[in-house]
Amino acid sequence: MKKLFFLASLVSLACISCKSKKEAVKSADNKPTTVQNTSDSTVKYRIILSFTSKASGPDEEKRKQIMAYIESHPKKPAYSVTLWGREGEFDYNLTLSELKSKKEEDKFIEDIKRIIGGSDMVHITENSEKLHQIR
């Protein structure tokens, strides 16, 4: 009787764990992705915004403010996203090729720095190749 109960419990546990994995894979397949995979790692980005985490995910409020600024900018600078961390860390990579002068680029970067303020969860890197690889 004990062996039968143990065997039934073991089979039930195995079925439940298999079902959970299938659902997790299925939901990940349905999620839209914003990651642009650029295979050329020698691209020089004018600015890279790295969103880090301190055990609670990246700073969502700063991300929203930066995205609102980029989307409302008259030149609509293009960007790619690199997901690289286990807690949702990511980079926004911008070449700023839409901005025609150095003065426009400097103003854009100055505005981004103003939005970030004193946040220690968003880091700016200028004139660099991609910092992280896609996970």
Image: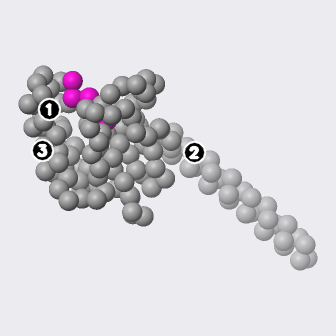
Q: CA distance from mark 1 to mark 3?
A: 10 Å
- Mark 1: amino acid: Glu
Residue at the spot 36% in from the left edge and 54% down from the top edge = 52
Residue position for label 3: 111
How packed mark 2 is, by other alpha carbons closer than 10 Å (few <14, some 14-19, many 20 or more), is few
Front residue of 126/98: it is 126
To which residue does mark 1 refer?
Answer: 105
Q: Nearer the viewer, residue 13 or 108?
A: 108
User: CA–CA distance between discs 3 and 2?
Assistant: 40 Å
Q: Residue drawn at (89%, 77%), measured in percent from left and top? A: 2
119 up-or-down from 106: above or below: below
Percent across and percent down for residue 59 are 30, 57
Farthest residue, direction front: 127
Closer-to-camera residue (88/129):
129
The magenta region covers: 93-97
**Mark toward the start of the polypeptide (2 vs 1):** 2
Residue that badge 2 annotates: 25
Helix, strand or loop under label 3: helix
